[in-house]
Amino acid sequence: MPSSILEPCPWVIARARTMGLRSILDVGTGYGRWGALLREYLDVWDFNYNRATWTRVIDGIEINPEMLGPNRGHYDAVWYEDARTRTKSLRDDETTYDAVLCSDVLEHLEKPDGTELLANMAALAENYLILSTPVGDWLGNAHGENESDKHLSIWEVKDFMVPGKETKYVSAPLLLDAGLTLADLARWDTPSGRVLSVIYKRGA
């Protein structure tokens, strides 16, 4: 999908700046806004304008080779393939990143495929897993013209977090079993529907 909901951007970037990230995997780059924002606020913000001296590794996965366009330059490696295939390959190679970011991707997969992707991303996240997705029925809401832009599944809050005893919410079982605990969350009611952003931390 070329673009997506605006509201999560400042929320995610403000938190990413405090995480001490050295490597990030952007799953489903789209037009590459996350690569551009992460590069700006993790490297360029410190007056590091020279690509040759950038210190953060920002890799991406995008199924549509035509999508990324001019923002390709903000990334290091980019793999143009299905996110499930590439994340599984990285998982098999025991590759990890300080943070894995996945925004507006899960709803474009059938629910079992999205669950598989979640498991792969959880394994790749050394410290943080950052998710942003529409919740509720957004079926048929496709912001783009490609087959991969279609919304194929419905995700609910309970897929990502469930009521907790000591805190209001805890990680949903799949993520908790992977060693990821709920660190922060936000929800927005937009003209298109409700959007959820969640940050999980390993060993929090």
Image (cartoon, rainbow, N blue to C red):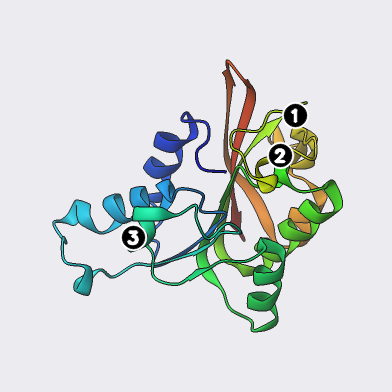
Residue at 72% x, 56% y is 118
Residue pointed to by mark 3 = 74
Residue at 16% x, 61% y is 48
Residue pointed to by mark 2 = 150
Residue 17 visible:
no
User: Taking 147 as reference, is 128 above or below it?
Assistant: below
Instruction: In this rendered view, identify the residue nearer to me: 198 or 153.
Output: 153
Secondary structure of the residue carrying numbered label 1 = loop
Looking at numbered disc 3 in the image, what kind of residue is underneath it?
His
**CA gap, disc 2 and disc 1:** 7 Å
Instruction: In this rendered view, identify the residue nearer to me: 126 or 31.
Output: 31
Q: Is residue 60 left or right of residue 174?
A: left
Secondary structure of the residue carrying numbered label 3 = helix
Secondary structure of the residue carrying numbered label 2 = loop
User: Taking 44 as reference, is 4 above or below it?
Assistant: above
Q: Name the N-terminal-most of marks 2 and 1.
A: 1
Quarter of image, res 58? bottom left
User: Do the CB atoms of the residues marked 2 and 1 lie less than 8 Å apart?
Assistant: yes
Q: Residue furthest top?
A: 191
Q: Is residue 47 left or right of residue 64?
A: left
Query: Looking at the rendered structure, which numbered label has been put on residue 140?
Result: 1
Query: Residue 88 at what x, y percent from top left?
Result: 71, 72
